Image (spheres, grey):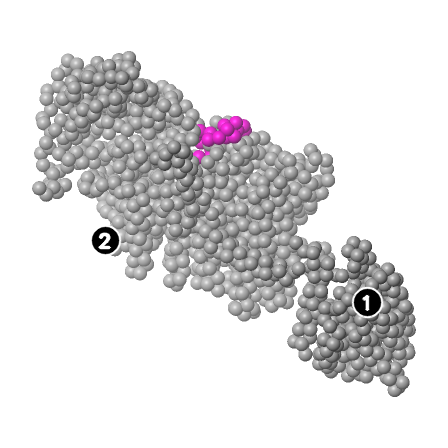
């Protein structure tokens, strides 16, 4: 698989990555705004404009940073690590085209580990504040992360068995080449497992309620109570891009049409538009699901994740049987 | 030829008889003298074999046995006995008739066992091996069932004589070194037991070995 | 009646009243369309809280102007204080205020916060909000009308 | 080979250095041990790079025809790892040794312990292997007992450790002797030559016996019980050596006997090894999240890591016997790479834990905290090693785990369903263990080092001696380097895998700094990834400097406006692990009890509420306790027969003699 990488490819790969990052930095908050809008309209409210998250971020950048006095040097670094890990994950994943920079090492395990790095950093930041909320949030978030890991990896195995590799561009290109894969039973089962894991990882309902005010019910929010101004902006953008990336990956892995395979600007433009459309559709679906569901009790979440795990194992077994 | 055989049989038989008599007698001083007699018989067996095979080393061993087991050890034991006022053996753990019946059973057992040894190399001397094995077993029985320290020493020495007898009969004596080693062991054991006996005597006033039971935790 | 399905209600017209014409006079639009407040109940009788809830409810929908209540003062631009400052809440109020990053604003909601109101000289009352900090925006009324609250928040977001 | 012999000689000299006066004894001996490790490391690396096998035979030094040493790539890899950890441990103990650790026995045992660790992989005859193995066991036992006066549990730990090590050694001896008996010679070359001719049942019995012994040393679950007791009680440099080097010798043993001597053998062997790995990985990781003693947490994490390695070895063996040499090579290389990576990050973690214990006087996470500011260097080094254990991208753990997963994944093309199911179970175990390890080490780092100091001891902590920090730095270095450029090490590891399992010697990775699998579709370039991460950080930092408000203010942490925020309000390690305990309650079976002491006047007012949570080892409770109580019962019965009467004893022997004669007749 060692393609002879000419300098043109490298630079255009980097260009694609930069486009992807900028698209996600602006697009992900818009996606959150869209979700809020859908929720508002379903509740009969006009709701904030879709660009509201961007306004919030712009305002946050103007505010001062406030650091807890007992915290060590780890706390100020955490927002940067959270944002950087997601930015790199977005840069190398096949969102607009199958060959962004470093695409040969755009391994699904690398993306999973980068997101894990983000959540580990958040948890460490939460513990470093020295308050009860930080510890509580960190403990719950890591517990759910640990329980989600098997479902995630076995789903990755299901995809890898079918496509022959865990390399993301290879899977996307493979699905483009064999459309039958997209509708195959193991692909759908893996989709089920991955969507459950995405809900758990990004802290959406029914696992965690992002707009809760009662600290005791928080999972993700409790870890970020301590960040102010630019730190909070980084963490919020990081979380939004994490949701955007996972949603985009699910879209591209299961409905890869529109992803550019060549370097021509036209293909890139089509890829961007296709990505926007796909993410919008999925985000609206998620919002509608969220409005109808209530938050699960914390100790019902393992059962949900166990369900995801079983779906993933079924995906692998069907993959092996039908091969 | 027959004189050598007769002397051999009589002497070996005498060793076993002495062993049985030590079981039979109650008086400790009598037992010590019987032990001396047994030592002498053993010496005769060794000497007889030495003469028959004209083996000088075996001759030296025979003299050594006569000196050690016939004279030195009994003298030592008598000195110990002089210090002990009560010379009569207290009632042994197993009464005399039962001991004798047991001795008989042990003799039968040794015949059954040594039949295999004899089958190996059936020569006139090896045919007498059961006597040696029986002496060992009887000596062991004496050691186990007697409470007086001195009689236990005698039991041990009878076992040693039994072993020496078997070695003489089977391989016409073991190399001198082994013989010396074995004798040294016996002497050592005797010294230790003597020390034990005297210290026990001074500490508890009596040689009852059963006082030791208080020592356990 | 059976609750409408989510999708049908998605496209139904929202129940929010049309937004009144913003009067330019007192809206300084300091926060340019995004205002996060941390609500602090410094000893209120819960009357103002009910009105605040209905201010964010579909009818008056203060959210539409970019205003939002947040869980932590660190995330907030200011405090939405209700009730007269009681002895127990004096310390926490000051701590919460200190936790809000600059530039920050204090919104006094209801007569108790503005000027002591009905419970001004109660035995548990420690001080007025004005003793702790001068409020930037005051919403009179006991309890203040949700439209008035929405109006005040619009003033800050300038939308 | 000569360098290795020189190293061993220097080690012996270090032992002799114990005769010096007290203040000279520790530095000189440690420096000599460090020198020995350097020599051994150079010898091993030279061997790994060149790949030719060299032997040394010194007759008549030992009764069973002398010591026989053979340095082949597999042995060289383990010697290099041990030497590296040994070097760091020696430097560390210069600053660490005080009190009982400066006694003559401790210094001699430490020197002989490192020497025997270096000697075990090179042994190539049953006698030499067992001699070195026993020396290792005895010296580590002595070191474990070094501080028993200050800590009573050290005695209990030593008892467990001694009993299980000797039992393991006995099993190994039995297995090897069984093989030696059937191949007419006790040196490995003879065994290797005769192995195919030995019948399968005999080979299986021998392998199972040897597996029992080596698996207990590697901490595989049913036989792991000594590990969480011995490692916390041993002095830190010793527990670093135990976890870093000694435990991986168990893995070395399984590969040497199963793969090299018995030439792969039967499929079910390797499925058993894989099953052991799966159970160990899950059990170790789970208990790591549940333990609130820092070193006990690290000990369980060692069981988890060794479980992962066993999964790799088991997969490699299974794939090789079902005829997939290429996938087998990948799994074996992954397992050996993980052993190397584990030695460095686990060693660094134990040394850092030792530094924290030295500075605060306690190992209990619930009484630590707030060490980041006074002990900045130790915290940073612990953090680097912890991130490596959690397998985050630029660190060595990630490269190891990625290789392991690729090895398992590319084994799926296999045909026999037993192997495929085993590989799938392996992937699941790997995934859950990775998740649980992340929880355990966020707990260890976050609660142990960050936040606010929970006790007076933690508050008064001060940074440890420079030699200790240097040692930790030495071990933290490969955590990053192996993660950034794993490709450079892989060819050497592949040569070791080939020597272990007689697989095709072609390296499974295309030459280069990254890991580009040859023959399979999968690759990562950790170096470029690291550059991308740094670039990302830089870009974000720059944009914020331009766009964002740079004012910063320190204020009291937000605890919803509480009047007084004390350190006791923080989450403790027990609380952090409690949700997982509740999810896995039937495996861990924690016993927590709640006592509410009511006020004297009336039951409705409580004076104090104490909640205690204890998670002890479920395997130990359900498997070892019954066996021990049965033995204890048998002991009391036997005691009654021993009442001090000489006659009774004589009677026993007499009866026995008679019975034997009867039986013979």
Taking the spot 18% from the left edge, 36% from the top edge, the residue there is A39
Front residue of C89/B146: it is B146
Horizontal placement of C148 versus D247: left or right?
Answer: left
Front residue of D341/D159: it is D159
Image location of residue D76, percent across then percent down: 58, 50
| Above/below status of B24 relative to D401 | below
Residue at the bottom extreme, as displayed: B2
Q: Identify the mark at residue A183; answer none if there is no mark.
A: 2
Horizontal placement of B18 versus D549: left or right?
Answer: right
Which residues fall within the magenta stretch? Answer: D447-463
Front residue of A319/B88: it is B88
Q: Is residue B103 magenta?
A: no
Under circle 1, the secondary element is loop
Horizontal placement of A206 versus D274: left or right?
Answer: left
Q: Is residue D450 magenta?
A: yes
Q: Which residue is mark 1?
A: B88
Horizontal placement of D186 versus D394: left or right?
Answer: right
Circle 1: is it few (<14), some (14-19), or many (20+) Cα within 10 Å?
A: few
| Above/below status of C45 relative to D506 | above
């Amino acid at each position: 698989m060692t393609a002879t990488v000419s300098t043109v490819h490298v630079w255009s790969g980097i260009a694609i990555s930069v486009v992807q990052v900028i698209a996600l930095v602006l697009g992900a908050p818009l996606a959150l705004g869209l979700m809020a809008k859908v929720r508002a309209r379903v509740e009969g409210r006009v709701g904030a404009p879709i660009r509201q998250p961007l306004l919030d971020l712009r305002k946050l950048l103007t505010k001062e940073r406030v650091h807890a006095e007992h915290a060590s040097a780890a706390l100020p670094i955490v927002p940067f690590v959270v944002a950087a890990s997601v930015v790199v994950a977005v840069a190398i994943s096949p969102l607009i085209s199958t060959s962004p920079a470093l695409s040969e090492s755009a391994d699904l395990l690398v993306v999973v580990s980068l997101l894990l790095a983000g959540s580990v950093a958040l948890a460490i930041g939460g513990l470093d504040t020295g308050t009860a909320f930080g510890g509580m949030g960190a403990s719950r978030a890591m517990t759910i992360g640990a329980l989600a890991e098997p479902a995630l990896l076995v789903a990755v195995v299901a995809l890898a068995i079918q496509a022959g590799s865990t390399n993301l561009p290879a899977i996307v290109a493979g699905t483009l080449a064999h459309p039958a894969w997209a509708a195959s039973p193991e692909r759908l089962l893996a989709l089920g497992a991955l969507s459950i894991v995405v809900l758990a990882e990004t802290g959406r309902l029914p696992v965690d309620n992002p707009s809760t005010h009662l600290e005791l019910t928080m999972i993700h929010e409790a870890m970020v109570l301590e960040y102010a101004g630019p730190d909070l902006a980084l963490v919020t953008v990081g979380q939004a891009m994490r949701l955007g990336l996972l949603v985009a990956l699910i879209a591209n892995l299961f409905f890869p049409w529109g992803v550019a395979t060549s370097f021509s600007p036209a293909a890139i433009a089509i890829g961007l538009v296709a990505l926007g459309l796909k993410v919008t559709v999925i985000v609206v679906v998620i919002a509608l699901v969220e409005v109808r569901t209530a938050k699960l009790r914390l100790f019902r979440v393992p059962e949900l994740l166990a369900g995801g795990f079983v779906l993933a194992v079924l995906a692998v077994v069907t993959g092996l049987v039908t091969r | 030829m027959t004189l050598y055989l007769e002397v051999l049989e009589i002497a070996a038989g005498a060793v076993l008889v002495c062993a049985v008599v030590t079981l039979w007698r109650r008086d400790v001083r009598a037992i010590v003298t019987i032990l001396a007699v047994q030592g002498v018989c053993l010496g005769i067996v060794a000497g007889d074999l030495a003469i028959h095979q004209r083996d000088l080393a075996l001759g030296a061993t025979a003299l050594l046995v006569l000196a050690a087991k016939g004279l030195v050890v009994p003298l030592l034991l008598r000195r110990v006995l002089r210090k002990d006022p009560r010379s009569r053996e207290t009632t042994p753990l197993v009464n005399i008739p039962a001991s004798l019946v047991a001795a008989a059973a042990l003799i039968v057992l040794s015949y059954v066992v040594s039949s295999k040894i004899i089958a190996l190399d059936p020569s006139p001397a090896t045919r007498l091996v059961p006597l040696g094995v029986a002496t060992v077993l009887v000596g062991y029985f004496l050691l186990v069932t007697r409470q007086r320290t001195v009689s236990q020493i005698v039991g041990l020495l009878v076992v040693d004589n039994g072993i020496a007898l078997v070695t003489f009969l089977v391989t016409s004596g073991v190399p001198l070194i082994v013989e010396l080693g074995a004798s040294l062991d016996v002497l050592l054991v005797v010294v230790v037991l003597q020390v034990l006996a005297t210290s026990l005597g001074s500490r508890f006033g009596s040689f009852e070995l059963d006082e030791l039971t208080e020592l356990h935790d | 009646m059976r609750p409408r399905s989510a999708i049908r209600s998605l496209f139904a017209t929202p129940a929010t009243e049309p937004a009144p014409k913003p009067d330019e006079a007192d809206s300084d639009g300091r926060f340019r369309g995004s205002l996060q407040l941390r609500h602090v109940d410094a000893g209120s009788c819960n009357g103002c809280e009910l009105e605040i809830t209905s201010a964010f409810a579909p009818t008056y929908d203060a959210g539409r102007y970019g205003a939002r209540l947040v869980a932590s003062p660190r995330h907030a631009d200011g405090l939405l204080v209700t009730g007269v400052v009681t002895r127990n809440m004096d310390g926490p109020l000051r701590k919460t205020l200190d936790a809000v990053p600059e530039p920050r604003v204090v919104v006094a909601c209801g007569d108790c916060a503005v000027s002591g109101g009905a419970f001004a000289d109660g035995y548990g009352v420690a001080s007025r909000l004005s003793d702790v900090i001068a409020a930037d925006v005051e919403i009179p009324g006991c309890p203040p009308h949700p439209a008035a609250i929405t109006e005040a928040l619009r003033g800050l977001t300038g939308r | 080979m000569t360098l290795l012999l020189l190293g061993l000689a220097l080690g012996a000299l270090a032992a002799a250095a114990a005769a010096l006066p007290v203040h000279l004894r520790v530095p000189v001996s440690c420096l000599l041990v460090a020198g020995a490790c350097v020599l051994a490391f150079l010898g091993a690396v030279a061997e790994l790079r060149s790949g030719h096998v060299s032997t040394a035979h010194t007759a008549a030094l030992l009764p069973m025809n002398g010591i026989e040493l053979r340095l082949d790539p597999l042995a060289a890899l383990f010697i290099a790892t041990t030497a590296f950890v040994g070097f760091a441990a020696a430097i560390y103990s210069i600053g660490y040794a005080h009190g009982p650790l400066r006694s003559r026995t401790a210094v001699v045992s430490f020197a002989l312990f490192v020497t025997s660790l270096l000697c075990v992989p090179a042994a190539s005859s049953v006698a030499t292997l067992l001699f070195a193995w026993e020396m290792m066991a005895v010296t580590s036992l002595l070191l474990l007992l070094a501080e028993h006066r200050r800590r009573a549990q050290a005695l209990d730990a030593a008892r467990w450790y001694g009993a299980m090590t000797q039992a393991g050694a006995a099993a190994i001896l039995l297995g090897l002797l069984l093989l030696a008996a059937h191949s007419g010679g006790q040196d490995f070359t003879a065994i290797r030559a005769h192995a195919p001719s030995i019948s399968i049942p005999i080979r299986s019995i021998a392998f199972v016996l040897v597996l029992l012994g080596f698996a207990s040393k590697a901490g595989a679950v049913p036989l792991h019980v000594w590990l969480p007791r011995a490692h916390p009680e041993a002095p830190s440099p010793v527990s670093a050596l135990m976890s870093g080097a000694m435990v991986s010798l168990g893995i070395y043993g399984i590969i040497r006997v199963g793969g090299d001597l018995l030439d792969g053998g039967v499929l079910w062997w390797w499925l058993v090894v894989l099953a052991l790995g799966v159970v160990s990985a899950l059990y170790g990781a789970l208990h790591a999240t549940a333990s609130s003693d820092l070193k006990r947490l690290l000990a369980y994490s060692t069981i988890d890591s060794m479980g992962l390695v066993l999964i790799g070895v088991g997969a490699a063996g299974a794939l090789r016997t079902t005829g997939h040499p290429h996938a087998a090579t990948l799994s074996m290389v992954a397992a050996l790479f993980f052993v190397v990576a584990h030695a460095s990050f686990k060693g660094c973690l134990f040394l850092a834990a030792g530094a924290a214990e030295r500075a605060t006087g306690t190992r209990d996470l619930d009484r630590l905290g707030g060490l980041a500011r006074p002990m900045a260097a130790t915290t940073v080094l612990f953090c680097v090693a912890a991130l490596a254990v959690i397998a985050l991208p630029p660190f060595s753990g990630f490269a190891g785990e990625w290789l392991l997963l690729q090895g398992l994944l590319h084994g799926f093309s296999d045909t026999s369903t037993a192997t495929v199911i085993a590989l799938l179970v392996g992937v699941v175990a790997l995934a859950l263990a990775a998740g649980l390890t992340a929880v355990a080490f966020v707990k260890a780092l976050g609660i142990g080092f960050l936040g606010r100091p929970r006790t007076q001891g933690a508050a008064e902590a001060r940074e440890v001696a420079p030699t200790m920090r240097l040692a930790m730095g030495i071990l933290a270095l490969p955590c990053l380097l192996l993660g950034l450029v794993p490709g450079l090490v892989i060819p050497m590891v592949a040569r070791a895998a080939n020597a272990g399992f007689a697989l095709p010697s072609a390296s499974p990775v295309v030459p280069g700094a990254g890991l580009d699998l040859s023959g399979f579709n999968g690759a990562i370039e950790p170096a470029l990834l690291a550059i991308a991460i740094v670039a990302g950080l830089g870009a974000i930092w720059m944009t914020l400097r331009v766009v964002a408000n740079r004012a910063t203010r320190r204020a009291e942490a937000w605890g919803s406006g509480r009047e007084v925020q004390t350190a006791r309000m923080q989450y403790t390690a027990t609380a952090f692990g409690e949700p997982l305990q509740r999810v896995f309650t039937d495996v861990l079976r924690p016993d927590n009890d709640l006592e509410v002491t009511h006020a004297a006047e009336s039951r409705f007012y409580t004076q104090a509420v104490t909640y205690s949570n204890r998670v002890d080892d479920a395997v130990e409770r359900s498997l070892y306790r019954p066996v021990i109580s049965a033995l204890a019962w048998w002991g009391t019965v036997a005691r009654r027969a021993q009442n001090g009467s000489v006659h009774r004893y004589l009677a026993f022997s007499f009866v026995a003699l008679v019975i034997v004669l009867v039986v013979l007749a």
